Image (spheres, rainbow, N blue to C red):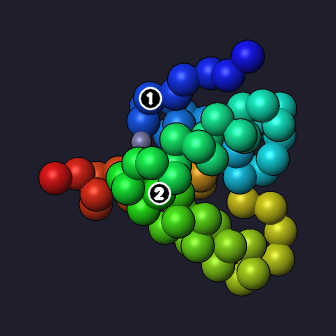
Amino acid sequence: MRHRFTCEDILSLLFEYLDQEIEEEVIYSIESHRSSCPYCSKVIRTYRLIIQCLKDTEDKDVPESVHKSLLKIILREFQE
Ligand SMILES: [Zn+2]
């Protein structure tokens, strides 16, 4: 069974998605939404890049609170 995700669903799952702490089924649904939605695609790309930078600089896992604030900032940036 395949889930149908809205943009909002995707964004609320981003943390788990990037940490790969979710079922493959869900990852698949996110991927398929993302490939057809330029907005989510842009948000995920930016989010992932920044998290990667943080991980490289800090050399440790980024806490969930940081993820959440980061996401808020990105969403505000991308709001049109
Ligand atoms: Zn979307």
Picture quarter containing residue 51?
bottom right
In the displayed orientation, state which residue is furthest to the left. Answer: 80
Q: Residues within 10 Å of mark 1 (few under 14, many from 20)?
A: few
Residue type at the position of mark 1: Thr
Residue 79 lies, with reference to residue 3, above or below; the image says: below
Q: Position of residue 69 (x, y in %)?
A: 48, 50
Residue 21 horizontal side relative to residue 27, left or right: right
Q: Position of residue 14 (x, y in %)?
A: 60, 44
| Of the pair 27 and 77, the residue shown nearer to us | 27
Name the residue carrying label 2. Answer: 41
Residue 54 lies, with reference to residue 29, above or below; the image says: below
**Is the CB of the residue bearing disc 1 within 8 angstroms of ligand 1?**
yes
Residue type at the position of mark 2: Ser
Q: Earlier in the sequence, mark 2 or mark 1?
A: 1
Tell me what residue is drawn at x 83 percent, y 68 percent.
60
Tell me what residue is drawn at x 59 percent, y 52 percent.
67
